[in-house]
Structure formats: structure tokens, C-alpha cells
């Protein structure tokens, strides 16, 4: 199981977005070479801190409340968000972040990374490591997990 210290280490050493379009997808995961190549039925992962977790809903917050650990969980999430924002300052602008039609996708990519790392911290803090904690290594090596397609498969740029 990943610890908060390990999560922070992964965030600190991340090669944010350095290998976009180079993901070699194992079975069950969809690799796209550019944002324009994303499936039409893609449901993007959130890039807004206030968005409801599309994987857990409010179940993790309810569990934290039930266990009396809400302050600890909130602090873990905020710390992960802070570390991620600091680490993202090193990210180089990748040409694929120009997006289809030339719009700047870098802010959405950065906020999606912050969201994923925050949710990973919540999972870890509550010993429910799983979905978000498993996405962080993809960000760490330079990919961007975009979301899920209509079949529920992970889509990675």
C-alpha cells in the first residue's frame, strides 16, 4: 500500500506531461496520441477541486466523518495539492497541450493532476488506496490520464 510519504515523493519527482502521446497501453486501457484522438464518449476526469469524485462519490468523505478523521483527511488532501502545485512549476510546456483547435489545455492538465493527487491522498489516509493512487504513477512518468471511455476503460495521453 502506498503511504502519504511515498505519494509526496512521487509528486516531487514527477516528470509532468513529459511523455504525452507515448503511452503503451496494456489490455483494458486506451492510449491516445493527442487530445483530439480521445474517444468521443470520453468522460474527462475533474480539473475542478470542487468536483464530485467520479469514482468514489462522497463515500470517502462519509468514511472520514464516520471515523472522526475529517480534519486529518482534509489536511492530507491540501498538503498533496500544495506539493503538486509546487512540483508542477517545473513542468515544461508540451506541444500536445496546445489541444485541438489550438486552445491551451495546460491549465486543465495541471488541475487534473492536482485533483488526482488530492484524491489519492484521501484514499491513502483512509486506507482505501486504489483508483486515484494508481493514477499518480502515470502522471509521475509523464502521461496524462484523461478519463474513462463509455466502456469504463481508462484513457491515457
Image: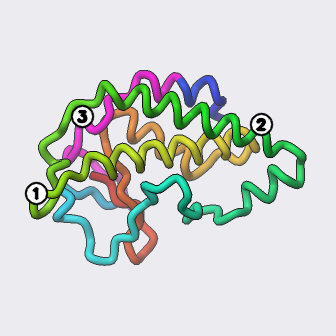
Q: Is residue 128 left or right of residue 84?
A: right
Tell us which disc is closer to us: 3 or 2: 2
Location of mark 1 (residue): 102
Q: CA distance from mark 3 to mark 2?
A: 33 Å
Stretch of the chain drawn in magenta:
9-29
Q: CA distance from mark 2 to mark 1?
A: 41 Å
Circles 3 and 2, Cβ within 8 Å, touching? The answer is no
Q: Position of residue 68 (x, y in %)?
A: 89, 46
Is 2 situated above or below 111?
Answer: above
User: Which of the two labelled residues, at mark 2 and mark 1, occupies the earlier sequence position?
Assistant: 2
Q: Residue at x 84, y 53 (%)?
A: 65
Mark 2 residue element: helix
Q: Position of residue 126 (x, y in %)?
A: 76, 44
Is 18 situated above or below 115?
Answer: above
User: How crowded is the residue under tag 1: few (<14 C-alpha within 10 Å), some, or many (20+)?
Assistant: few
Query: Camera-side residue: 156 or 70?
Result: 70
Residue 32 is labelled as none
Tell us which disc is closer to us: 1 or 3: 1
- Please say whether residue 12 is one of the residues in the magenta stretch: yes
Amino acid at each position: 500500500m502506498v503511504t502519504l510519504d511515498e505519494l509526496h515523493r512521487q509528486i516531487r519527482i514527477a516528470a509532468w506531461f513529459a511523455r504525452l502521446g507515448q503511452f503503451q497501453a496494456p489490455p483494458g486501457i486506451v492510449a491516445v496520441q493527442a487530445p483530439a484522438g480521445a474517444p468521443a464518449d470520453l468522460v474527462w476526469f475533474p480539473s475542478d477541486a470542487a468536483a464530485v469524485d467520479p469514482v468514489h462519490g462522497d463515500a470517502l468523505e462519509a468514511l472520514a466523518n464516520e471515523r472522526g478523521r475529517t480534519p486529518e483527511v482534509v489536511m492530507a488532501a491540501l498538503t498533496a495539492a500544495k506539493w503538486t502545485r509546487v512540483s508542477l512549476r517545473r513542468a515544461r510546456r508540451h506541444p500536445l497541450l496546445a489541444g485541438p483547435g489550438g486552445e491551451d489545455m495546460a491549465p486543465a492538465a495541471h488541475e487534473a493532476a492536482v485533483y488526482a493527487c488530492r484524491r489519492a491522498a484521501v484514499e491513502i489516509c483512509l486506507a482505501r488506496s486504489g483508483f486515484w493512487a494508481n493514477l499518480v504513477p502515470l502522471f509521475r512518468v509523464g502521461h496524462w490520464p484523461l478519463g474513462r471511455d463509455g466502456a469504463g476503460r481508462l484513457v491515457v495521453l
